[in-house]
Image (cartoon, rainbow, N blue to C red):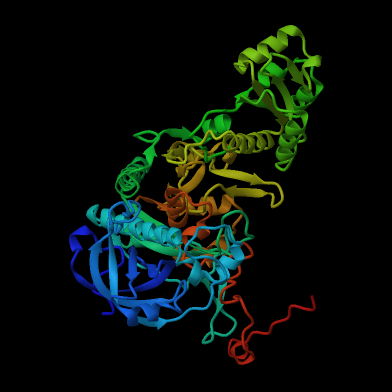
Amino acid sequence: MYKTHTCGQLTAADAGQSVTLAGWVHRRRDHGGLTFIDLRDRFGLVQIVSDPEAAPEAHAAFEPVRNEWVLQVSGVVRPRPEGMANPELASGEIEVVVSEVKVLNPAVTPPFLINKDEDVDENTRLKYRYLDLRRPRMQANLELRHKVVKFIRDYLDKEGFLEIETPILFKTTPEGARDYLVPSRVHPGEFYALPQSPQQLKQLLMVAGYERYFQIARCFRDEDLRGDRQPEFTQLDMEMSFVEREDVMDLVERMYTAMVKQLVPHKRLLAEPWPRLTYKEAMQRFGKDAPDLRFGMELQDLTAWAAGSGFKVFEDALAAGGHVRAINARGLGGYSRKEIDALTEFAKQFKAKGLAYLAITPEGEERSSFSKFLSPEKLAELKTALDAQTGDLLLFVADKPEVVFDALGRLREHLGEALNLIDPDLLAFCWVIDFPFAFWDEEEQRWEPSQHLFTLPMPEDIDLIESDPGSMRGTQYDMVLNGTEAAGGSIRIHDPALQKRIFKLIGLSDEVARERFGHMLEALEFGAPPHGGIAPGIDRLVMLLAGAESIREVIAFPKNQAARDVMADAPSPAEGHQLKELHIKVDIGKK
């Protein structure tokens, strides 16, 4: 070994020991003939001292050394001089007086500082990801990710689960996002698909009798990138036999509650047990089915009040089948017209036609875009309904329900951040249940499952499949954390006849269903048990636990927002002989 100890291992108890260390130069300082170097490895930092009188050769070897050079040093551990201890470091009470230095590898000047968490363009960070990953914050993120995965494996092992790997090369079954296709050389003209998730395979494992399965699964989706998505991601994939919805939710809640307490004890859970909301309640109160419960400012339904209010914008929206809802942004009553216009433009990004407002300034004056159309009685009713007080800003959207929910829900979160209402150390887990089973797709003129094709409808709603599918609820459940969907699951269909009815509902003919999912239908005919599962995202969970702003901060080698690996420059063209072997001709035309 190049080292007897790690850089983060030495303490005052090691004083007097001869040690050999190896690592990177984190920082160099020259003081009055002495040279100080902070040596870094994955385990921490330790201060190295070079004295020209005590070890002239070693001191001379330090002369050309700069940041990020790789060194091996030998010396004796001693306590730091009185008043010079660094309480921020585990090794802050000691230093190593060097007697021998060996340069293992010099380094050119890096494109950004490793020893300082400065703001660096993300594409630069990704191009030099191997340098970015040296930064302490990134190493802490990946260490947390390791601990999360290890916790999951240990916990589920004790719960009787088996970790079973499923294929990466599988059958293409177009649904949801696009598949990544892999051409077969030995079967010309045919393709494998990379799994969007192991959904079908884990259900087949239940048919096979394994009862409790999990894996840390790699998943692939070729979809238009937006926000925080990656073309490849990692999820905890779980499936259980002979369970109902409560059984799956209870196990996951116990596991994640224990994980938080063990791995991030400085974080606080909002509530135990976790709150449960129906889909309808979540939408009405928060405007989205993945609500952030860390702060209030909930949506208020003013539809009944708006009828006959005298304000044409509200009344026209109601006549078209819409809603009128509002939020009370407490403390913003002093906002200027320019600031309110900025909020209006924000709401318009989500299809709202505008943003009506009533501001009650800190001085008690009222400014409004519509109050002049209201009678004193209707205005008083409105302020009572929204508990309006001096200094409040009331914001209204009137439109189709989906527009009202989206615009106000996003505005609520935007203002929650702007007003610093969100505690970064609070973890607000909740469950959302009773989702609509399917939504009508106007463009395709067919029903689209709200989750996936294999979700079981609520048993009491099964008779509505042919007569009123829009009123059906699914057995799915979402685990939500701080306004982000962190997992989705459901009880699955185990009856082949029911599965065929669902295929028919979404417009799959018997022939197409057999072609795409024949293996599933056949398997269900061989005694499939009742079963269900869930698939929490690993990347997103670690991001939230680490307080990172993007899942790219917790993935070792992510793609950028254009789905490119800028470090290796992928994707890239294939060689001509490779394409010939695969019987593929590339024809993309001229750009």
Q: Quadrant of residue 402?
A: top right
Which residue is at 44% across, 38% downward? Answer: 428
Q: Using the image as rendered, state which of residue 387 and residue 318 is in the foreground.
A: 387
Q: Quadrant of residue 32?
A: bottom left
Q: Position of residue 213 (x, y in %)?
A: 32, 59
Q: Is residue 564 left or right of residue 97?
A: right
Residue 212 in sight here: no
In this view, the residue farthest toward the top is 377
Q: Position of residue 264 (x, y in %)?
A: 35, 47
Q: Position of residue 287 (x, y in %)?
A: 59, 35
Q: Using the image as rendered, state which of residue 417 and residue 49 is in the foreground.
A: 49
Which residue is at 51% across, 63% downward? Answer: 196
Q: Is residue 426 left or right of residue 44?
A: right
Q: Position of residue 55 (x, y in %)?
A: 30, 78
Q: Using the image as rendered, state which of residue 461 and residue 275 is in the foreground.
A: 275
The vertical placement of 587 against 559, above or below, is below
Q: Quadrant of residue 479?
A: top left
**How many labels sit on residues?**
0
The N terminus - image quarter: bottom left
Which residue is at 78% across, 20% downward? Answer: 370
The C terminus - image quarter: bottom right
The vertical placement of 312 against 86, above or below, is above
Q: Using the image as rendered, state which of residue 217 and residue 460 is in the foreground.
A: 217
Residue 146 in sight here: yes
